[in-house]
Amino acid sequence: MSVIKQLMENSEPQYMKAHVKGVDGLSEKLDEYVDKASDETITGQKKFEKVPNVSANGSDQPVLAGCVSYTFSAADIFREYQSTITAAGGKVYRFANIVIVAANITTKDVTVATKALRLPEGFRLSKNGVYQIGLEVTRNNEQKPNEKCIINTDDNSAIRILTGVDGNGSNYVTGMFVTDDPFPAG
């Protein structure tokens, strides 16, 4: 068994460097890392292998930064309604768990409850909340503004046109809602 010897200097006991403050340079190196207990500013780009979670109010929530978007095209028109939905454009944007719709749907003789546009995965209405969300519709000034659009939880991947249209033309659809879809790759 080895014996630990007490070091003395000027009749004062000296202890071996056996803790963090005693290891040369370690304390300074540790100060470069994040302090778990106080506010700090972190600089530089941090890359995570998995989405980190933040615990708050007894709930773990993923940290989702930035924005991703999806651009609508004719491929997003439901095939069975391509004779009445003649063109589509615009985008949906995803910020954290909020989806913002800014779409243009061109219609021709739309009937009640037509599925207009397919929402991609990552941008669908949450099934854990309200049953449906109404979307604002603005039309060209020659057209009567009687069109209404919704997304509901029966088919949370579809923007639906609820009422018939007087005349053909563009319908500018805007709105926002909450999603619980996984965050789409940017």
Image: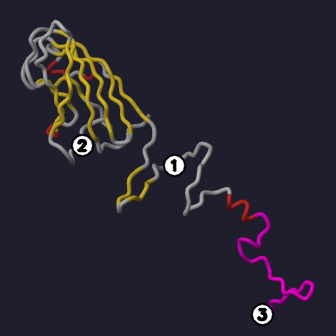
Q: Position of residue 125 (x, y in %)?
A: 24, 38
Q: Secondary structure at mark 3?
A: loop
Mark 1 is on which residue type?
Glu
Up-down: is 46 above or below 24? Answer: above
21 within the magenta span: yes
Q: Which residue is mark 1?
A: 49
Mark earlier in primary sequence (1, 2): 1
Above-or-below relation of 97 to 143:
below
Q: Which tag is nearer the camera, tag 1 or tag 2?
A: 2
Which quadrant, please, contains the N terminus? Answer: bottom right
Tell me if 43 is positioned left or right of 120 in this view: right
| Count of residue discs | 3
Q: Amino acid at mark 3?
A: Met
The disc at residue 1 is 3
Please report the bounds of the magenta region as a residue range.
1-25
Residue farthest front in this picture: 39
Spatial distance from mark 3 to mark 2, Cα to Cα? 66 Å
Residue 54 in the image, given as x and y percentages of width and height = 43, 55
- Look at 27% across and 33% down and name the residue there: 176
- Asked if residue 123 is among those painted magenta in the image, a careful observer would answer no
Whether residues under marks 3 and 1 lie with C-beta atoms below 8 angstroms apart, the answer is: no
Mark 2 sits on what residue? 126
